[in-house]
Image: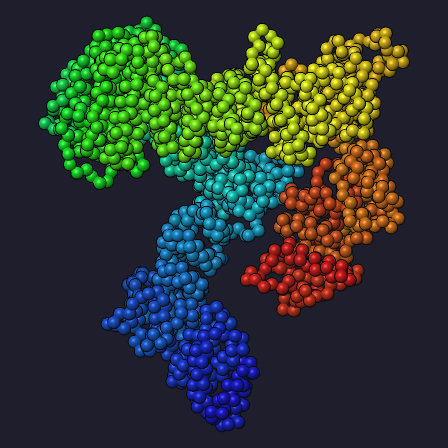
Amino acid sequence: MASLISSLSNSFRQVPPAGIPAMLDCILGATASSPSSLFALLVDAFYDLIKDIAKDERKLDSDRCNHISSFLCAVCHLVEKSGVNYDAFQLFTWKCFIPLMKIIHASDREILNQTTESFVGVVIKTNSWGLLEENMVPILIRSVGLSMGMLENEESAVYQWTECSISGVSIQLRNYSDMMEESMFSLSLPISCHILISILDAALQNYPETPTSKLILANEYCHAEKFAGHLLWDLCNISVQLLSQSWDLRSCAINFLLPLIFKAFLSYKTFEILVHEKTYVLSRVCFLKEIWSCCKVLFSLGTLERRDAYNVLSLYLSYFYPTYECQDVNTSDKAKEFDIRADSDFWGEIKRGLVDKEGLVRKQSLHILKTILHVNEGSQCYPGVPEKVLCQKNSSPRDVTKRGRWADKEAKSLGVGGIYQSIDLFLTCQQRWVAFILLYEMLEEYGTHLVEAAWNHQITLLLHFSSPNYSINSVNGEIFQNQMSSMDEVFNWLSILWERGLCHDNPQVRCLIMQSFLGIEWKKHRDFAKSVPESFVFGSFIQALNDPVHHKDFGVKGVYSSRTIEGATQFLQQYTSYLNARGRITFLRNLASVAKQQSFGRAGLMGLAECIASAATDCQAEWCEDAVPNIVQDDSASESASHNDKTVLLDVLRFVVESSKQHFNHNYRLRVCERVLEAAASMVCTFNVPLEVLLHFISALPREFTDNGGSLQAKLHQWLLGCGKKHCDSSCSSTKMKLLESFYDFPERFISRHRLVNAFVTYDDGDLDAWGFEAKRWTRVFFLVITKEQDLVPILKFIQIYGTNIFREINNFKWVTMKFLIFTLSLVQELHIMQERTADCSVNVRTKSEFGFAESEASFVTEKFVNAFVSALDELISYASLSCSIFSSGIAIEDGNLPGSIKGKLGGPSQRRLSLSTSTSVLQAIMSMKTVAAISAWCVQLKSDVSLDLAFKFLWKFIWKIISCTTCDTEIGAEVRLASYEALASVLKAVISVFSPLALDLIRENDKSVLQKEGGPILDSLVLTFLQGINSVLEFGALARTRRAILMNWKWHCLESLLSIPCYALKSGANLEPNATFFSDAAARWIFSDLVESLENAGEGSVLPMLRSVRLVLGLFTSGKLGSVVSPHCMDAQMMWHLVRSSWILHVSCNKRRVAPIAALLSAVLHSSVFSDEGMHVTDNGPGPLKWFVEKILEEGTKSPRTIRLAALHLSGLWLSNPKTIKYYMKELKLLTLYGSVAFDEDFEAELAENHDARTEVSLLAKSPDPELTEIFINTELYARVSVAVLFCKLADLADMVGLINENDDCHAAIESGKLFLLELLDSVVNDTDLSKELYKKYSRIHRRKIRAWQMICVLSRFIHQDIVQRVSSFLHISLYRNNLPAVRQYLETFSIHIYLKFPSLVSDQLVPILRDYNTRPQALSSYVFIAANVLLHAPEAVRFRHLDELLPPIIPLLTSHHHSLRGFTQLLVYQVLRKLFPVDFGEPEISALEKRCFKDLKSYLEKNSDCVRLRMSMEGFLDAFDPNNSVTPAGIFTNRVEELEFECVPTSLMEQVTIFLNDVREDLRCAMAKDMVTIKNERLSVDEDSNCMERSVDTNKEKLLTLMPKDISMDFQKKITLGKYEKQDTSSRTFLDNKTTYKSLLEIEKEDQLLDQLLQYRSVAMERIIASQQHFILVASLIDRIPNLAGLARTCEVFKAAGLAIADANILHDKQFQLIRALEVQNLPLEGAMMKFFQNLQERKSVTAEKWVPIVEVPVSSVKVFLEKKKREGYSILGLEQTANSIPLDKYIFPKKTVLVLGREKEGIPVEIIHILDACIEIPQLGVVRSLNVHVSGAIALWEYTRQQRCQ
């Protein structure tokens, strides 16, 4: 038997499974063996085979699979022959089937299906359902449980599934007790599920055909039926469990279990199952509800879960939805069915899916929606729309534009119907759904132009026929109709379309959708606006408003708006017109809160502000008529809620204002703040919100807008005094009084807020900052509220009471005194700010028109404050003196261990390393000194008083005490010293700003060294003592690193104040004693050395004071200034090198390029006191320190626009003051001349407007030679060269003074520098690689640099003298002869005119010979004609007629030039000369009679000829544009063309205007002749009789070309013609008589007439070549409907010269998308192609498209078969590109010469009825995973293979 088994096993390798049963029957009959014995042997052999395969661990190949299949078939056959044998079945199961399934992978679908089918077949034939239920099913279910991670219950030895409610009762799986070890038989989840569903499917197939809808299963029923019910029960539980598991487990449920479960429930609604004598009902309704619950859970999770939920829904709808629609059941039964469409959650999920970011989720949602709505995939038509409506006249309304008519045509082609004009029509819900689907598919699938064509049409249709005026007809009472039955629902679905469109990937689509949405007449359709969901408004709409693509013109010319913003404001105004006051406040709060949720750009934030203002607009009339009736706010709770809403609203509006700070443009921020303030004033009464919220909001508004002279001052003041709006409550009338009362209560509340009995409260810097901000907010707004003197009385009284009783609070509450000091200091600071702004606005104090103060009252009010402060000053001084005792060295300071770490914000100011009590005392001392100094400095400017003198004595005594303080010896002592210097910095800044002669006496009084040495340096001791003291603290090393940096900051602030004393002293009129000085030489050098050594390591906060100190020190070295004894030449080069290098390191280490530090750096290093020293610019070995620094700063400036602009401003002023130094900076001047970068720097403008330091530092730069131009151009890319142009313009004025009385060395230096720079630039434009290029693009970098260079050369024309004129003219003629664009040539011409006007003798020597050289380039000749004409027109009378005699004769012949532009240009200029020089007649005696008649007739012709008149009229304003006096000045070059800043301030030149005119005339001529030729063509064209196959034959092409030939064509045409290689190489061809002559003619662009004659002569030959070159290949693409594919195939057929292309609809050739895709330039077409292009495009001047070069045949889908049969009769072989069982690989197929290739549909391929008539099918061999190619790509590959084979033959 062993040999038999071995022989059988080998036979199984050769015999297919189908032959196994017969072979076994023969063996059994021949050997008389029993089936059972042979079965047992084969089972063992099969088991051994499986084990061998499992050990091999290789994937099953085809041979092994065939072997296993045959072996398994043999075993199954023997089991079946054994009959009902339970032992055999179990043996087969455990030794064959299970082991085999363990080695089969889930991806091996073929063998998996064969094995499962064989097993199920054995079960059915042996009726082994009982064994299967008891043994096999539990094993499989256990495998599934293990896959889900469930644990075994040890007590019952079964898997206890979680309780579920499929049937409404609690159930558990049955106990499968007699199972084998599960570890031995565990299968993978996909395999287990596959086996289970195969078993269930087989069991369900054994059900009897019952007419009832339910099946009762009891124990006495057959095993198969009972088994099916039990298994279905278990699988339902498993499916529910799997859906809550991971992705791979869910996929098994979706792909394996649910389809079969749904199939089972499709036939039977319920199953009654008897288990353990209990009956359970398995209901379809309950199971579907459970599945829907699982889906809802999945929807709430991630993206993958959402996809799976949609897959489940798709399965559900594919099985049950058609049943619901088709079954004829009564209403009661239908009501009991579960219909997911009745659940609102379902529609919510569909809506969310349609706008999901994942494209796959959107497609799934759309598919489900279309399934429910009965919308087929290709459906795009309105069912039920009357035919008469769809067949209206094709003509569009007269007021529709051409684009609109095209859009209407596109809409009709999509099946959306005509334009509905009848008011009696309505749309049913189904029609609305179809419209919705079409619109959505447009966004997802269609091209941009199709969306543009049909979108507005559809939206208008939906809105018009969905209004409440039209009734709704439900179709068959469908559930989903309710989703489109009301306006609210319609707009809910429309919002999905708008949201999807506004976030589309294509910016053009986003713009289109936004324009469509805003283009709805919301004011006309008032009911529509309120139906738009708020979620859409606050979400997608506002997000789209933040999209820059909608605001292309935003910010242009200072206009911060756009059409989108304007439309959005109009929409929101209508949207909120239905809201009452409370609802409007809530809406505005939510709208403004969007700014907190996302970041807004410039345009987005402006749009948000405009929308807020628009929504807040108080439409009082509309509120009364249309709004929801106002609710009377009598109830206290409602009133409180209203106040809370207003509070929140004002707070979020503040956030919007603060968000505008990140956008630096001054005007932009003003607009945002203005709109937000309007909204606040419209909706909020100032009394109805807490004072603190109001203060925060107003403080967020920039001061420059709200303070004196601000743009928002009047609006803000009006709002604070009472808004007067209708929606305000009764308390609004007394707003001012109640607001003032709250302001009066603030000081008391502020000071006593934390008052506790016997409490000693400590505080730190954070507390002081918070209290300071609070007090500053109050003082700022308080002075905006008051209108008269009486309003100040309570505050003045408060100051007097607390100021005189300040000592009473010291011992009890230190923080009370501190808060009073903060409050007082904030008042003083606000008064000081008001005083400064008043001075800036050139007014006294606030005028009565603004705040109610009369001018006479202003000074009185100021005097009141001065008196109040002075009355409290003595008390404050006493308190400050006591508090400052902590700074004296004699005070014992507690010592102790300081914390090792420093609290506070990372990177911010470090916290004081002191105990809380000591910190409190230190802060008291600092604040008290700040307050005393601030009060004294402000009051002394307005009043002289004894108390003020005592105060200044106290302050100077404090200064000397701190400066002279002894060195500390502990860290705590060092911390206290640091605090003392902090106080010193504030005191010095205050007292020095009001320096007076008394201060000098106080300095001498406190400085004993000065008293001992009369006439010595006054400030040496003060400054040097300060530096020594603070340096000793720094060197001591006790301070932490961060604290040491803070001390350094205070050091430089104090030093800046001390070095400023000489300046303030001289300004105040202080007189020094004879021989008295401020600083000694040694002191100044020591201070300079200390500064320079510290520059490299300066902190960000120390940069400005250090650079200012450097500037002040360098000012000390200026001779005769500040009383310094320092020699003006003591600053040697070595010191300067040290300074410039340290300053440069400081500059590059700064992360941010702020205006103030850059300006301070320039004014400090490039100081006027050292710039005049030539030794600082150059040395023997190279550049000096100043030149080195200038090179560095300009090199860095090429990357920083603000740096180079400020450098240009400062350097131009210095160079003008020191012309001798200019010769060292030729390279830098050229860099500034050619510089170009960012055109606008908003941050720069904002810093100048808002930052006081920036304004101050810029004002200290060297004065600009032209302040007016500086103001215009300082923030543009032009300023660098504008400053250089202005510099040399002023130097030219200085040079003109040579020879006059006031001549000096600077005049000669100006001449030399101007000549030197002129020759440098001319050499660059001639020899530089970039500037000398002749071929460059318009608006390119080279083009711009050329313009900049020649603009500067024009400015330098004033420096041309006799000694350099020959060199200059040589450079000029080289440049004129080269090719240059008109924008460049106009500056060359201007420069030339000035040379010849300045040197008349050069006209005859240079200009006349050039004009007589008629071989000169036409472009150069045009320039010389323009130069000569302007020389004639502007020459002095003394030389004019001499020039006329020399120049006019060589110009006249150019009137006959073949070059059209030169000819027209010369005519224009000659007439201008004749008109101005010979205005009446030719009566000059020197002109002969013949010449007289000739010139007279010439003038008459040029004057009266219609073409010349048209030319002159089009040149109006250009002929007289040249002004010799203004054309070479900076004002003439730049200022007069500010509007044209977009391109280098270049105006349109006369030559460019003439060229434009001539091109337009030629275009008109082309169009006129094209119309005539179209008429001729229409008369001769014949119509093809075959309506189905309108084939364009070759003869038709030839006839058309002959027809299009005009008999007399004298016109210009497009010259982009390139010969094909065969035309170039075929020298032996007789068709081109002289090939070289023809080729030369084609390439010579001026000889157009000769070219045209030759083209007309050879047209027939060219047509014959086209016909002969075509291949006998026809491509049939009638089954393809996508436009991009058809367009690509048309291009491919043209490239390979196919004989024809068949498409289903010829109208597609006129489709815009088809034309755009197929647009093709003809630069490389052969000669024949150029001829066809010329004749076929005379009507329209546009690029050629491929469909005009390949014959395109219209073959509808219904006629494809007829067309192919016709071609077969003509001898063509009919092939199909399709994958079939007998298809031939493309690379192995030999194409016949005459071939027709059929392409199939994108998805379905070639239909069967067409495949039957094909001669062969070919396929493209593929190696990748994806098994398909795009149909266009496939066709191109096949066509190329055909072409390759034909070329080889």
Counting from the top left corner in percent of width and height, residue 1010 is at 26, 14
Residue at (89, 11) in percent of width and height: 1489
Residue ID at (77%, 57%): 1672
Image spot of residue 614 (x, y percent):
43, 27
Describe residue 328's horizontal placement relative to residue 761 as left or right. right
- Residue 1189 locus on image (x, y percent): 48, 29
Q: Which residue lies furthest to the top in this view?
A: 856
Within the image, what quadrant is residue 1436 found in?
Answer: top right
- Furthest toward the left, the residue is 758
> Residue 1338, can we see it?
no
Report x, y in % for residue 1250.
Answer: 40, 23
Q: How is the image coloured?
A: rainbow
Q: Can residue 1800 be seen in this view?
A: yes
The quadrant in which the C terminus is found is: bottom right
In the rendered view, tell whether residue 438 sits above or below residue 1425. below
- How many numbered marks are there? 0
Residue at x 42% of width, y 22% of height: 1131
- Horizontal side of 465 relative to 153 (left or right) equals right
Determine whether 498 is above or below 565 in the image: below
Image point (80%, 32%), residue name: 1611
